[in-house]
Image: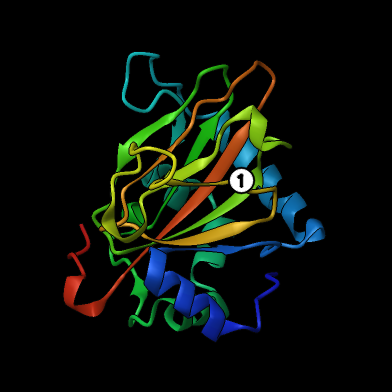
Amino acid sequence: MLLLPADRRGLRDRFAAEGYVPLPGLVPPDRLVPLRREIRRLESMAAHQDRGALRPMTTLGGRLIAEESELIPRVYHDPSLIELVRAVSALEAVPVADPPERHVIDILHRHDDAHGEHTHGHPLALVVFSEAPGSARDGGLLQYGPRGTDPRSADEVARRAHHRPGDAYLLRSDTTGHQVTALRRPGLRRVALNFAYTTPDRQPAAR
């Protein structure tokens, strides 16, 4: 299903330096169709968070995904995908033991929807885009602080990345602060599937 990059060494070097590496075109267009269809089906079960929240957007939680989807968990456990995460991160990445903690889908679909600055409890996040604004000018950009710097810092420190549908990125999510900039006009959608991976020494018990 996935179009895996061959240059693992170059990706590993950038990941080590920045805590972030892009994986353009990880999901080919023909494989993106069923994934997008599945996310749209799950989206009908979710609720949008209020504008005043730190993360004004629609979130599909891990429990909903674990209980209602077969496709997404299958992609999450793809051995070739896990091998890629290990090769790029230089960590012994393993699936998270607790199914609801493995994956979440964040959907920005209203003007000014955003995702505030945060880190994750698990060390690795592989984020896959099923939908994204066509231009960086439309917002919905990942903004991250390389090597632990604050992603809210001035532009010369923080970095921004625009991704297209089918793209992905790997993030050292426990130490690399990151946020998503607001959508700048109505009619845009940014839909990101977040896969969390951990290491054996940081594996929480399944509930």
State the residue in front, 35 or 19: 19
> Residue at 65% of width from left, 56% of height from top?
167
The quadrant of the image that shows the C terminus is: bottom left
> Residue at 60% of width from left, 35% of height from top?
190
The image shows residue 62 at horizontal and vertical percentages of: 39, 47
Residue 141, placed above or below residue 102: above
Q: Residues within 10 Å of mark 1 (few under 14, many from 20)?
A: some
Residue 118, placed above or below residue 54: below
> Residue at 35% of width from left, 43% of height from top?
151
State the residue in front, 204 or 106: 106
Q: Name which residue type carries label 1.
A: His
Q: Tell me, yes or no, if residue 41 can be seen here.
A: no
User: What residue did someone put label 1 on?
Assistant: 162
The image shows residue 126 at horizontal and vertical percentages of: 47, 61
Q: Tell me, yes or no, if residue 144 can be seen here.
A: yes
Q: Residue furthest right?
A: 30
**In-image side of 109 versus 145 (left or right):** right
> Residue at 35% of width from left, 76% of height from top?
94
Residue 156, placed above or below residue 17: above
The image shows residue 103 at horizontal and vertical percentages of: 42, 53
Tag 1, which secondary structure? loop
